[in-house]
Amino acid sequence: MRCLFVCLLFVTAITHAQKFTIGIVQDTLVTPVNGEVLIAKKPFAIEVTLDGIEGVYLYASFKDTIFRLNSTDPIPGLADLPGMAMAEESLNKDKELIMNDDGWAYWFYDPQQDWHRFDKEIIQIDRKVIGRKSIQQFYFTAKEKAQKVKDVAAPLYLFFVSATQGENFNLDKEIQRFKLKINWQ
């Protein structure tokens, strides 16, 4: 009986394994409390660990529209996210996070490519990839204007999702989601 319980726990852990984890780094790793972090209004980094997947989609906004989704609510337009992914500077040369209420970012790593959306340095350990995206400013595509982190007043809402790819490059099944609210000191 004890073996059955331990075996069931092991199988449950495998089937619910995370495909990505997210961390906020500002001097040190900042631990979220109830899905929120409190950091200073100065540059920070978003650290993404990919475990056996190529990448993760991100919706970043100062509005909580997507962020308010419950864990079982469908993500609007999930199938079309690849077509909604915005082009960001290779190797994060601008040190910015693109803000667009109609677009998503796709942060990935492919060892066959000589570019990606993270900072230049990538850590690869077996099938895990750790990338950081340093953020010094936010770029608003609709206004074609940048705003430094120090000048932001509203909380930042981050919504990450990974999904399987179906036909015609559309996404067909959500694998994992993670949301995080960044509050400013």
Image: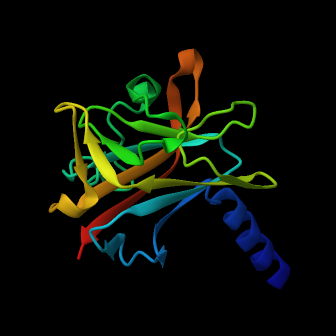
Q: Nearer the viewer, residue 121 or 17?
A: 121
Residue at (24%, 71%) from the top-left corner? 184
Residue at (42%, 30%) from the top-left corner? 85
Residue at (55%, 40%) from the top-left corner? 91
The answer to which quarter of the image holds residue 37 is: bottom left
Compared with 7, 63 (above or below) is above
Residue 94 percent location from the top left of the image: 41, 42
In which quadrant is the N terminus drawn? Answer: bottom right
Furthest-front residue in view?
Answer: 93
Q: How is the image coloured?
A: rainbow
Q: How many marks?
A: 0
Residue 100 percent location from the top left of the image: 26, 36
In which quadrant is the C terminus drawn? Answer: bottom left
Compared with 97, 3 (above or below) is below
In the image, is 81 to the left or to the right of 174?
Answer: left
Residue 161 percent location from the top left of the image: 47, 46
